[in-house]
Amino acid sequence: MSRARCAKQVRAEAIANAAAGHNGPLGVSIEEKRQAPPRLFDLPSLQKTCGQRWGWTADKTLSVAQELYDGEGKKLITYPRAEARYLTENQIADAPAIVAALTRLRGFAHLEIAPPVIRRGRSGHFCDKALEGVSHHAVVPNVNVLDDLETRLARLNEDEKRQFALICRSYLAAVMPDYEYRQTVVTASVSVPGVAAAEFRAVGRIPLRLGWKAVYQAVDPDAEAEAEQTLPSLNDGDNAMLSDARVEAKRTQPPPRYNEGTLVDAMQNAWRFVEDPALRERLKEAKGIGTPATRAEIIKGLKRQNLLAADGKLVLPTPAGLQLFELLRGAAPALVDPGTTALWEMRLDEVVTGKADFRAVIDGIAAAAHDLIDALLRRSSGTVDLTTSAPARRSGRRRISGQAGNRAKPEDSKPARTRRGKKTAQSSTRKPAAPAAGAYDEGSARSQAPTAKMVAYAQSLARGKKLTLPERYQQDFDACRRFLDEHAW
């Protein structure tokens, strides 16, 4: 029988005493069920899987995938910085060719997939609507290199072979039949004096058709085999006696530590850590903190600054990281609240839809950054020791005022895209410390004087870092912007 958890010892002991030697009828239900295959890989789910199976860092997973994508003589997979787990509906036509090529390989030759099973819509794998506003579909084998697949595979190192096999299995599973099984649920109700009756329950499964699970069970020795409890043949109403009823004292376990893969997953699903319903929904739409292309770089940057450190397969905050977090949480809690990202996403939405002028939004974000920096300057005392063997950083980074705007999304060199796929102002508008600096890189604005917010922001930086402001910074937009670009970090 399955074990139940009870928080009150007195009740648990009462149930165990009542169950000892209980004899009574069983409730038995038998149902045939089916389970569809898991979704295809996007980059975060690929990083999470590689981290859990092989202890890879998020950066290593991306590097291996990038080599599979554009390595010389390879090009075996589609674009790896994928942000969706669906394929377009016109890729349905590729399925027979991809399946035929993969099942000619020795590792997949035992699989019978004829014809491929096509699942459309959001509950399936091919869905145009799910890809609206998304730049890149799921990571799958490249249909354009199937003619010389064996030759290309010979060029791969061991890590590349492992990851490519993982991506191939994911695709093959997606076009294989459902896993089918017979599930038996057995219950026994035990009367307990003075309290409600307790129900004992056991569940057993008998596989009927492996379906997509065959691709994992046969060729992936690292896959965890699902433990299926077997039950004897039973009929509803059969009498049974309960035995060996006992109370076991247990302690709840804290959530597990992050590895880089699960940390990437937490960044993507940061909405789970936000309580406000509207902000949760917007952060869910925004796909969390960072993008598939930048999350590994964010983690690498935090390690380089000695704010995170590896502990085997796990990633832990360093003492300096914890100290900085506590300082920020005390002086400027918005900087460590993922809901702030959702608020700024909403303001950018208003620019895209024409409900707000981009300069007004930029000024608002600059004002928020100005207030945060002032709060940090007022509240912080001393420095955070970021001693590390990484290359020397620019001066000012050790001070809390310099850390306040640490890069949240290192995408300065590329135009950002909204979740609708349209270009907006540069991604520096999404950063807490220096949104005004890069955001004003507009040809039409360069002939104008800087805004009042830019001037105030420059003056605040000059006071906080004891810097000399450039001549004409109040009249010359470019002069003011260059000062912000140089000193805002």
Image (cartoon, rainbow, N blue to C red):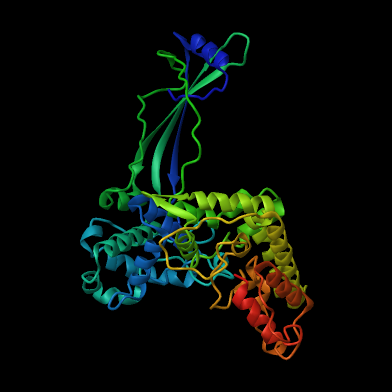
Residue 361 location in percent, x, y?
74, 72
Residue 327 falls left or right of residue 209: right
Answer above or below: position of 109 versus 245.
Answer: below
Q: Quadrant of residue 422?
A: bottom right
- Determine the image quadrant of residue 70: bottom left
Query: Split into 4 quadrants, where in the image is the N terminus?
Result: top left
Q: Is residue 120 left or right of residue 154?
A: right
| Residue 95 image-quadrant placement | bottom left
Q: How many marks?
A: 0
Residue 114 sits above or below residue 209 on the image:
below
Residue 239: x and y, percent? 44, 14
Q: Indicate the quadrant containing the C terminus: top left, top right, bottom left or bottom right.
A: bottom right
Rendering coords of residue 181 (x, y %): 39, 40
Instruction: State the residue in front, 216 or 260.
Output: 260
35 left or right, relative to 106: right
Q: Residue at x 60, y 65 (%)?
A: 402
Residue 408 lies, in percent from the top left, at: 57, 64
Question: 435 or 285: nearer the eye?
Answer: 435
Which residue is at 72% across, 62% downward?
A: 374
Can the viewer see residue 177 in this picture? no
Q: Residue at x 53, y 53 (%)?
A: 321
| Up-down relation of residue 22 to residue 359 (above or below) | above
